[in-house]
Image (cartoon, rainbow, N blue to C red):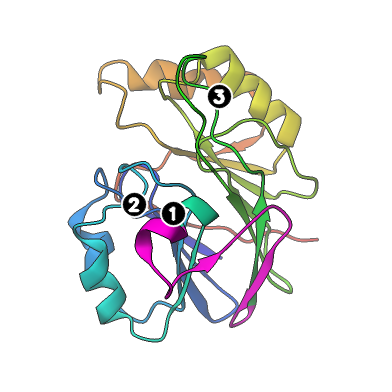
Amino acid sequence: MQITRYGHAALLVEAAGTRVLLDPGTFSLDGAFALTGLDAIVITHQHPDHVDVERLPALVEANHGATLVADPQTVEQLGAAWTAAEAGTTTRVGGLTLTGVGEQHAVIHPDLPRIGNVGQLVTGEGEPVLFHPGDAYEHTPDGVDVLAVPLSAPWAKSSETVEFVRAVGPRVVLPIHDCTIADVARPMYWGNVARLGGVDDARDLDQDGSTEVTLQA
């Protein structure tokens, strides 16, 4: 499994001969929107940092035939070409299976209504299991090998991030959702995950970083 981060929460996952891009949003690098040969484009929720509605149409056009998956509320906004993913919904894409996890975005403030958020488990025969939770720490599925953990958000604090990593118990943890952190402060947030999360393999990815994950069953 090859994982490349294109800024903030955007991940390109290449495994089992299949290429899946998750959460290309307004904070994502231009390179995410220049990708071709994608088998699927997946959106966890409607917030702009996870879906850039201005740049997305050109990406979809450049990847004609790619499976388009999003949470139900985002599908209402993006149109009929997109398939709604709900909790437990499975979508087969090439050699990979996408499984929806959860239904709601984390609470930002009690006075703000919660929107939909459906994280994704990415699985394939002989491949590590990747979990991209979108914006929520609420669900901790079993059997996760690689966790893409949101480092900072208006809805999170560092202690909750660490407890989420511990609860999931992955073999590898990677950072996402960190454009809300000043560069000078980011090592503190990631350092808490690396030191306290209980994961031996904590891989810090730059905004355009990539890593190959090979794990034995």
Name the spot of residue 58 as percent of width and height, x first.
21, 72
State the quadrant of the N terminus.
bottom right
Residue 43 located left or right of residue 55: right
**Which residue is most to the bottom?**
65
Depth order, front residue of 97/12: 97
Percent position of residue 211, x then y: 46, 55
Mark closer to the observer (2, 3): 2
Magenta region = 75-95
**Tag 2 and tag 1, C-beta contact below 8 Å:** yes
On the image, numbered disc 2 is attached to which residue?
51
Residue 71 visible in the snapshot: no
Q: Which residue is mark 3?
A: 193
Residue at horizontal 31%, vertical 53%? 6
Q: Is residue 89 above or below residue 61?
A: above
Which quadrant: the C terminus?
bottom right
Structural distance between the alpha carbons of marks 2 and 1: 9 Å
The disc, 3 or 1, on the residue closer to the chain's N-terminal end is 1
Tell me the kind of residue under disc 2.
Val
Residue drawn 60% across the image and 18% down it: 160
Disc 3 from disc 1: Cα separation: 30 Å
For the residue labelled by badge 1, is the local secondary structure a helix, a strand or a loop?
Answer: helix
Mark 1 lies on residue: 74
Q: Residues within 10 Å of mark 2 (few under 14, many from 20)?
A: many
Decide whether residue 162 is among the magenta residues.
Answer: no
Residue 87 drawn in magenta: yes
Q: Are marks 3 and 1 in contact (CB under 8 Å)?
A: no
Instruction: Pick whichever of labels 2 and 3 is earlier in the sequence.
Output: 2
Q: Quadrant of residue 148?
A: top right
Total of numbered circles in the picture?
Answer: 3
Left or right of 129 in this view: 16: left
| Label whose residue precedes the other's in the sequence (2 or 1) | 2
